[in-house]
Amino acid sequence: MVDKKGYLLAQVEGKRWKKRWFVLRGFFLYYYNKKEDQEDLAGAEGEISLEHSVVSLLNQDGKPVRTSPLTSPLSPP
């Protein structure tokens, strides 16, 4: 089951940024070179575990207002 999907910029090869297709499934964020590859988990270029992540709500200055552990894939802080 896909929770969210869309394009994000990923830093590759040091400082260069590249547009990649990301798919959030549960506590894992998978990334692909092409949107068309998303149907096959084996086609992912990589995955990022969000299981022990912390979510922060930021103010307009970019400073944390509230921080909490990620308890479900889409729960806000």
Image (cartoon, rainbow, N blue to C red):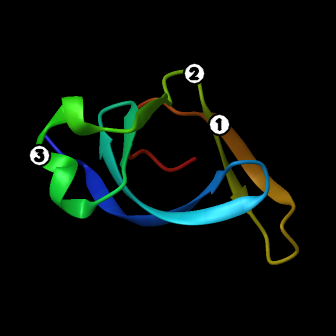
- Mark 1 → mark 3, Cα distance in angstroms: 32 Å
Q: Nearer the viewer, residue 29 or 14?
A: 14
Whole-angstrom CA distance, mark 1 to mark 2, is 11 Å
Would you name the residue on which mark 1 appears?
68
Label 2 to label 3, Cα distance in Å?
26 Å
In the drawing, does residue 34 fall left or right of residue 72?
A: left
Lower sequence index among marks 2 and 3: 3
Q: Amino acid at mark 1?
A: Ser
Q: Which residue is mark 3?
A: 39
Q: Secondary structure at mark 1?
A: strand
x, y percentage for residue 63? 87, 61
Amino acid type, callout 2: His
In terms of sequence position, does the residue under pointer 1 or pointer 3 come before the other? 3
Q: Which residue is mark 2?
A: 52
- Of 65 and 2, nearer the camera is 2
- Number of the front mark, 2 or 3: 3
